């Protein structure tokens, strides 16, 4: 297992207020630095979308590393990673599944009744 270190800092970025007191833009987010041995990943989690981490700095697109990044951020409520894709926008990343995920998919393909007790 890779040793990891995580840093976390909250930021608020906003524009000018108009006459009614509204900002022309307003972003509040947590900035995470995930260090896996000698590899660094930067991710942003917006306050209004806490289940998604937008990975903006990546040592590589290694599926093993991305799984480790997701595992580190799960206790923070993150269930999905997104990175800049070929479209130029952020796209969902599918990290390497855990053994449990893979087994659940395999069992689901066998039979809906597989593993159930006979009554």
Image (tube, rainbow, N blue to C red):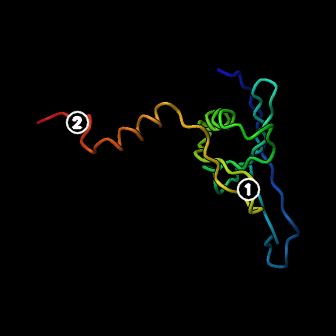
Q: Residue at x 59, y 43 (%)?
A: 77
For mark 1, give the secondary structure. loop
* In this view, the mark in front (1 or 2): 1
What mark, if any, has residue 85 been given in the picture? 1
What mark, if any, has residue 64 been given in the picture? none
Q: Residues within 10 Å of mark 2 (few under 14, many from 20)?
A: few
When asked about the image quadrant of residue 48, the answer is bottom right
Q: Nearer the viewer, residue 22 or 41?
A: 41
* Vertical comparison of 65 with 77: above or below: above
Q: Residue at x 74, y 63 (%)?
A: 87
Q: Residues within 10 Å of mark 1 (few under 14, many from 20)?
A: few
For mark 2, give the secondary structure. loop
Marks 1 and 2 sit apart, C-alpha to C-alpha, by 41 Å
Which x, y percent locates residue 107? 35, 38
Sequence-wise, the earlier of marks 1 and 2 is 1
When asked about the image quadrant of residue 104, the answer is top left
Which x, y percent locates residue 7? 77, 33
Residue at which label 2 appears: 116
* Vertical comparison of 37 with 107: above or below: above
Q: Residue at x 18, y 33 (%)?
A: 117
């Amino acid at each position: 297992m890779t040793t990891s270190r995580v840093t976390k800092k909250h930021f608020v970025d906003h524009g000018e207020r108009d006459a009614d007191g509204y900002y022309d833009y307003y972003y509040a987010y947590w900035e995470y630095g995930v260090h896996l041995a000698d590899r660094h990943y930067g991710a942003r989690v917006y306050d209004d979308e806490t289940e998604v981490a937008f990975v903006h700095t990546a040592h590589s697109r290694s599926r093993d590393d991305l799984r480790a990044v997701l595992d580190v951020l799960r206790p923070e409520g993150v269930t999905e990673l997104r990175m800049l894709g070929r479209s130029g926008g952020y796209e969902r990343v599918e990290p390497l599944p855990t053994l449990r995920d893979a087994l659940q998919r395999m069992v689901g393909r066998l039979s809906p009744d597989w593993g159930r007790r006979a009554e």
